[in-house]
Image (tube, rainbow, N blue to C red):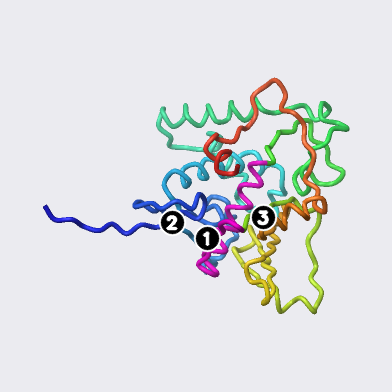
């Protein structure tokens, strides 16, 4: 019996080797707005099937909860609210009975998670960049787990590092994410150390690095012109020393009702 060698590939997420690599979109494929030029790069990176499925579900869950919390009329989010409505069976035609039931179940789940905004008054956890425009009131809110946002920001950064430097972020280096309150402005002296990554109006990224420490990197990510992340890649011990300088947002305990949950596999991966 002859033997055939199987080429193994590494997963950018869990770092394990797999003989069945899949291509994972660095910026989720379904998150690109209709205004994205056809010429825009849509990077992919190698993922094991398990991570690809888990992140695919996370992208879907976050999308349905976040997209109605940004300006749907902006170029950065054009067409995405309509796509989400169709995913929940609204304004969708030509569906089979089975597909209708599946989409109706999704709509029912999202509706079950809505919370009266007045119940959240004076409570911590509001995510900068998400929510109705200033001066506009919304009677309902939805809870989004910070862990899910953190995992998505890390996923994007791991994919960018792979595409730019063929790098797998692994010990002793680690990734730490934060939600930023405002867009960053870079002094002219720093411009030579900043690389712009353009995924179209839906996702703009700045990668900051220094020649003397090329593996220590900082990313600024803006999604849909609203949600902003600051992501650090550094030695684990250095991030531990500096963690008091970075404040993660406070949150609230999930109420006694359905809320979005992070799949156990992704929690284990994050830990």
**Residue at coordinates 56% horizontally, 57% vertically from top-left?**
170
Q: Is mark 3 on a helix, strand or loop?
A: helix
Q: Main secondary structure of the magenta part?
A: helix
Q: Distance between the residues labelled 3 and 2?
A: 22 Å
Per the image, is 161 magenta? yes
Q: x%, y% of residue 143?
A: 71, 34
Among numbered discs 1 and 3, the one appearing first in the sequence? 1
Per the image, is 143 magenta? no
**Residue at coordinates 55% horizontally, 43% vertically from top-left?**
269
Residue 168 tag number? 1
**Residue at coordinates 79% horizontally, 35% vertically from top-left?**
138
Decide: few, some or many residues near mark 1? Use Cα within 10 Å; few <14, some 14-19, many ≥20.
Answer: some
Mark 3–mark 2 CB contact (< 8 Å): no
Among numbered discs 3 and 2, the one appearing first in the sequence? 2
Please name whichever residue, 145 or 61, is drawn nearer the observer in this view of the structure. Answer: 145
Q: Is residue 216 above or below residue 147?
A: below
Please name whichever residue, 214 or 123, is drawn nearer the observer in this view of the structure. Answer: 214
Q: Is residue 163 above or below residue 192?
A: above
Among numbered discs 1 and 2, the one appearing first in the sequence? 2
Q: Distance between the residues labelled 1 and 3?
A: 15 Å
Instruction: Please state, as top left, top right, bottom left or bottom right, where the C terminus lies in the image.
Output: top right
Q: What element carries label 1?
A: loop
- Report the residue that reaches farthest toward the left: 1
Image: magenta residue range: 147-172
Q: x%, y% of residue 239?
A: 72, 55
Q: x%, y% of residue 238?
A: 72, 58
Check disc 3 and report the residue beneath it.
Answer: 236
Check disc 2 and report the residue beneath it.
Answer: 10
Q: In this view, does 35 lie above or below 103?
A: below
Mark 1–mark 2 CB contact (< 8 Å): yes
Single out the mark in the foreground, 1 or 3: 3
């Amino acid at each position: 019996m002859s033997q055939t060698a199987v080429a193994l590939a590494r997963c950018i997420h869990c770092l394990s080797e797999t003989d069945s690599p899949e291509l994972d979109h660095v910026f989720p494929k379904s998150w690109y707005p209709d205004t994205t030029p056809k010429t825009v790069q849509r990077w992919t990176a190698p993922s094991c099937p398990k991570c690809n499925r888990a992140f695919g579900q996370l992208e879907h869950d976050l999308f349905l909860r976040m997209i109605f919390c940004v300006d749907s009329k902006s170029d950065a989010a054009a067409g995405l609210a309509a796509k989400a409505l169709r995913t929940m069976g609204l304004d969708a035609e030509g569906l089979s009975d089975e597909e209708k039931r599946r989409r109706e179940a999704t709509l029912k789940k999202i509706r079950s998670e809505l919370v009266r905004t007045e119940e959240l008054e004076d409570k911590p956890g509001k995510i900068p960049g998400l929510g109705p425009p200033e001066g506009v009131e919304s009677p309902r809110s939805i809870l989004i787990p910070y862990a899910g946002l953190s995992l998505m920001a890390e996923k994007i950064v791991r994919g960018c590092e792979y595409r730019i430097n063929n790098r797998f972020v692994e010990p002793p280096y680690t990734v730490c994410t934060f939600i930023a309150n405002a867009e960053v402005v870079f002094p002219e002296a720093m411009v030579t150390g900043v690389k712009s990554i353009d995924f179209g109006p839906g996702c703009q990224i700045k990668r900051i690095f220094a020649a003397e420490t090329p593996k220590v990197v900082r990313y600024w990510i803006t999604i849909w012109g609203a949600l902003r992340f600051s992501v650090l890649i550094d030695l684990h011990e250095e991030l531990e020393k500096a963690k008091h300088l970075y404040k993660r947002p406070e949150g609230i305990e999930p109420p006694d009702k359905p809320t979005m949950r992070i799949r156990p596999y992704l929690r284990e991966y994050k830990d």
